[in-house]
Amino acid sequence: MLQKTGTFLLLKSIRMATLLIAICFISFLLIKNSPIDPIRAYIGADMLKVGPEQREKIAAYWGLDEPLMVQFFNWGSSLLAGDLGTSMIFRRPVSEIIQERFMNSLILMITAWVISGVLGFVLGVVAAMKKGTWIDRIIKWYCFTLASTPTFWMGLLTLIVFAVWLGWFPVGLGVPAGVLAQDVTLAERIHHLILPALTLSILGVANVALHTRQKLIDVLASDYVLFARAKGEKGFPLFWKHGLRNVALPAITLQFAAFSELFGGAVLAEQVFSYPGLGQATVEAGLRGDVPLLLGLVIFSTLFVFVGNLLADIVTYLVDPRTREGKSL
């Protein structure tokens, strides 16, 4: 068991290393061949006041006058040493910006992840138990509609309804405007977190709900459940005794695997609500040509998504013995 687990983790580590190397190389080439001018991004509004000689000095300072492969190896060497570089627009180390913004994004994503997982699982169970009824049809319509709804559109809709029309929540930002960081209370942070988390939660229930519904329908049609029905078991006790164990693991695995979708949705939600997370930092870095920050965010987001998928694989591997035996699910 321990040997198989060690081999499993070793193979996953090799895959992660090769993936990161490929992502680093491809991202570096794409950014270097894009129309982004890092010198212009660094200088900003004073571009017209800077002469050719000063541009050359700035390029030499950042190593931009070196050949492309030399730049890549210099950047890769610094990356292996734990140095992601300095942001051109924030004038701070990239690692500090990612750490600061990641905590905001992590709180948002965990909140939305838990709510969408629980709500999706409950809706899937209810739809399966009420198969063919109006409740089942409403839940399926709700899930199919959400599966095709863009995140930014849902964000704008919730913003208009709950912030503009009803005035229950703030229009945006992670904290109240004009308030010092040390004076912001936990209640105020939660108040600003609700709308973006609600947007991601509403959209995240569809996959879990539909998958749980279909899985539970198959379980309820099995021979051992039919035998339990013949003995007089029905309703919630029947589900709790015979259905929960069979549908909970696939739902948990699917929810862990949804980390990549959740991260992509968080980027759009943070932009709509001006929430100070990794998503908004990525958009700012792309629009303003901050190459070091953009590369750092790409690497970190790749690592984050891979870890989410790895957790899903580990949960399945440890809980389901069929994966350890090399059998297909």
Image (cartoon, rainbow, N blue to C red):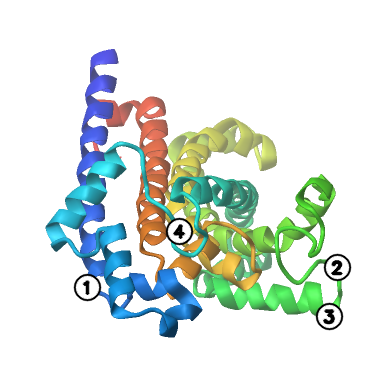
Looking at the image, do the residues carrying marks 4 and 3 touch, with CB atoms under 8 Å apart?
A: no
- Label 1: few (<14), some or many (≥20) within 10 Å? few
Q: Residue at x 79, y 65 (%)?
A: 177
Mark 4 to mark 2: distance in Å?
28 Å
Relative side of 2 to 186, left or right? left
- Kindly indicate the quadrant of the structure image that contains residue 165: bottom right
**Closer to the eye: label 1 or 4:** 1
- The disc labelled 1 sits on which kind of residue? Asn
- Kindly indicate the quadrant of the structure image that contains residue 317: top left
Relative side of 32 to 212, left or right? left
Instruction: Decide: is 132 above or below 107.
Output: below
Q: Secondary structure at mark 2?
A: loop
Identify which residue, 120 or 153, lies in the foreground. 153
Q: Which residue is mark 3?
A: 165
Q: Secondary structure at mark 3?
A: helix
- Label 4: few (<14), some or many (≥20) within 10 Å? few
Mark 3 to mark 2: distance in Å?
9 Å
Mark 1 to mark 2: distance in Å?
46 Å
Q: Which residue is mark 4?
A: 261
- The disc labelled 3 sits on which kind of residue? Trp
**Residue 216 in sight in this render:** no
**Closer to the eye: label 3 or 1:** 1
- The disc labelled 2 sits on which kind of residue? Trp
Instruction: Answer with mark 4 or mark 3, whichever residue precedes in sequence.
Output: 3
Q: Which mark is residue 33?
A: 1
Quadrant in which the N terminus appears: top left
Instruction: Decide: is 241 above or below 99.
Output: above
Outermost residue toward the bottom in this view: 48
Relative side of 32 to 44, left or right? left
Instruction: Answer with mark 1 or mark 2, whichever residue precedes in sequence.
Output: 1
Q: Secondary structure at mark 1?
A: loop
